[in-house]
Every structure is written in C-alpha cells, then in structure tokens.
Image: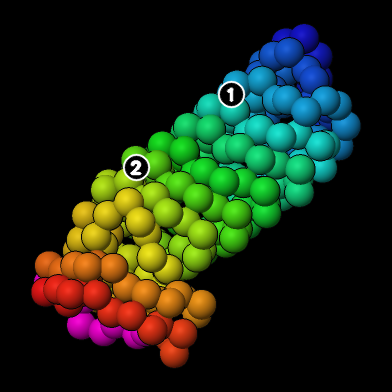
C-alpha cells in the first residue's frame, strides 16, 4: 500500500514478485536504487516500474514472457536492466524515456522490437539484439542520439522506415538482407558504412540504391549473387 515504507530512509534494495497488482511507484520509497524481481508468474502489469526515478538497477529473474507497454517508461535514473531468458516479447514504449541507460542485452527468444520501445533513450550506446529477432517496428529507436553502431541480426526481415528516426550519430550498420525494403527506405542518412553479415548469399535488386551518404559497403565472401541495379 501507499506509504508502506514511509520513513525507511536507509532502504536501498527490494526483492519482490512479478504478481503485484499496482505500479511500484505507489509504494517504493525514493531511497531504493536496486530492485530484484525474483518470483511470481509469467506476467508483469503495464507500467510496473513506471517513473521510478530513483532506481538505477533492475534484475528480473522471474520467468516472465512479456515486458508490457510502458513497463520502464520514464525511469530516468535506470542504468542497468537484466532480463530473463524466458522473455519473448517487449511491447511498445517499454523503455521510453530511460535517459540514463547506456546498454542492454535482449534475450534470445525475443522476435520483435515494438514501436517506441527505446524512444528517447539518449544515453544508449550499445544494444545486443538476438538472432531470433524478425521485426523492428516504427520509431523503435527514435532519438537514441548516442547510438553510433548497430548490428541487426541475419534473421531480421522487417525494419520500419522510421525505426531509427532521430538517431543523429548512427554511422555504421551491420546487417543481412532485409526483405521488406531497399535500405534507403529504413536507414537514416547519417549512416556512411554498411557491413553485410556472413552467410548472406545474395543481394536483391536495388538493395543499396539511392544511399547517397554511404561511402563504404563491405560484402562477405559468402555472397554469390549481386542482382541488377544493386548499387544504382
């Protein structure tokens, strides 16, 4: 309940479950800077950690399968998040406004980065995406201004045209063949270097066309076919 820990001026760490029914900012005192979610069911309520501006580290070991919408939204001091291997889905705006987070590793079962997932994570410099990833939705990394390089896994087939909108310092991408579009449709004009992942065997027609700011493209030895107008 609200004010359950009122006056606990030295309370720094909490261990709790994923099955509480209310957002944590209703009762977690501002002295707490570390939270462990170590038991409970497979679900976390929407906005569970919403606006916990004091918390710097969250470790989730409970076998949850979904990070719901706005789960960590506006956790302005959050620097480190450890997610469980059971995780399969990260919903929209999950880390929206986590302005202090510098890096994150996405677990191996996640197939989609939802829209606005990392919106305005202005300190995010490194994100490790799993080989299971199939889709990156609109504005997923919007305004991640500290992101300079990114590897998009070989199995990723759909990247929305504005996924990296506002990523003003993103200069290098490593990726395979995204079947949803030519690259000029989905990568920002700040990118000047592209590396194609090993095991890519063919480059489709017009794939690199109209990339007017790209100065360096590196293809692996595995590429056997370069289709017409590829660099048009």
Reply above or below: 43 against 199. above
Query: Is 213 within the magenta?
Result: yes
Reply above or below: 63 against 199. above
Looking at marks 1 and 2 on the same chain, the residue that comes earlier in the sequence is marked by 1
Residue located at (54% from left, 52% from top): 133
The residue lying furthest to the bottom in this view is 221
**Disc 2 residue crowd, few under 14, some 14–19, many 20+, Cα 10 Å:** many
In this rendered view, identify the residue nearer to me: 232 or 13: 232
In this rendered view, identify the residue nearer to me: 159 or 3: 159
The residue lying furthest to the top in this view is 1
Q: Are marks 1 and 2 in contact (CB under 8 Å)?
A: no
Question: Picture coordinates of residue 6 (x, y %)?
Answer: 78, 18
Residue 11 seen in the current view:
no
Q: Is residue 53 left or right of residue 22?
A: left
Q: Is residue 65 left or right of residue 158?
A: right
Q: Is disc 1 placed on a helix, strand or loop? A: loop
Q: Is disc 2 placed on a helix, strand or loop? A: loop
Question: Picture coordinates of residue 44 (x, y %)?
Answer: 70, 25
Residue assigned mark 1: 47
Residue located at (31% from left, 56% from top): 167
Residue 29 seen in the current view:
yes
Magenta-drawn segment? 212-219
Question: Picture coordinates of residue 203 (x, y %)?
Answer: 32, 73
Reply above or below: 84 against 149. above
Q: Is residue 142 left or right of residue 93?
A: left
Query: Is 36 within the magenta?
Result: no
Q: Quadrant of the N terminus?
A: top right
Residue located at (73% from left, 25% from top): 43
Residue assigned mark 2: 139
Magenta stretch prevailing secondary structure: loop
Q: Quadrant of the C terminus?
A: bottom left
**Disc 1 residue crowd, few under 14, some 14–19, many 20+, Cα 10 Å:** many
């Amino acid at each position: 309940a609200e004010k359950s820990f009122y006056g606990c001026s030295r309370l720094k760490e909490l261990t709790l479950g994923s099955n509480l029914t209310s957002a944590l900012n209703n009762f977690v005192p501002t002295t707490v800077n570390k939270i462990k979610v170590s038991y409970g069911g497979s679900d976390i309520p929407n906005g569970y950690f919403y606006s916990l501006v004091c918390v710097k580290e969250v470790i989730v070991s409970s076998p949850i399968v979904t990070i719901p919408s706005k789960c960590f939204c506006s956790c302005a001091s959050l620097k480190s998040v450890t997610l469980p291997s059971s995780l399969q889905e990260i919903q929209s705006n999950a880390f929206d406004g986590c302005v202090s987070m510098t890096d994150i590793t996405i677990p191996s079962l996640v197939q989609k980065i939802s829209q606005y997932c990392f919106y305005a994570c202005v300190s995010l410099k490194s994100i490790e995406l799993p080989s299971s990833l199939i889709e990156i939705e609109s504005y997923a990394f919007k305004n991640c201004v500290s992101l300079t390089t990114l590897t998009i896994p070989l199995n990723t087939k759909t990247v929305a045209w504005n996924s990296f909108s506002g990523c003003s310092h993103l200069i290098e991408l490593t990726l395979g063949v995204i079947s949803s579009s030519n690259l000029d449709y989905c990568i920002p004009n700040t990118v000047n270097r592209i590396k194609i992942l090993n095991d890519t065997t063919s480059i489709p027609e017009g794939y690199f066309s109209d990339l007017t700011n790209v100065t360096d493209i590196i293809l692996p030895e595995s590429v056997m076919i370069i289709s017409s107008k590829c660099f048009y």
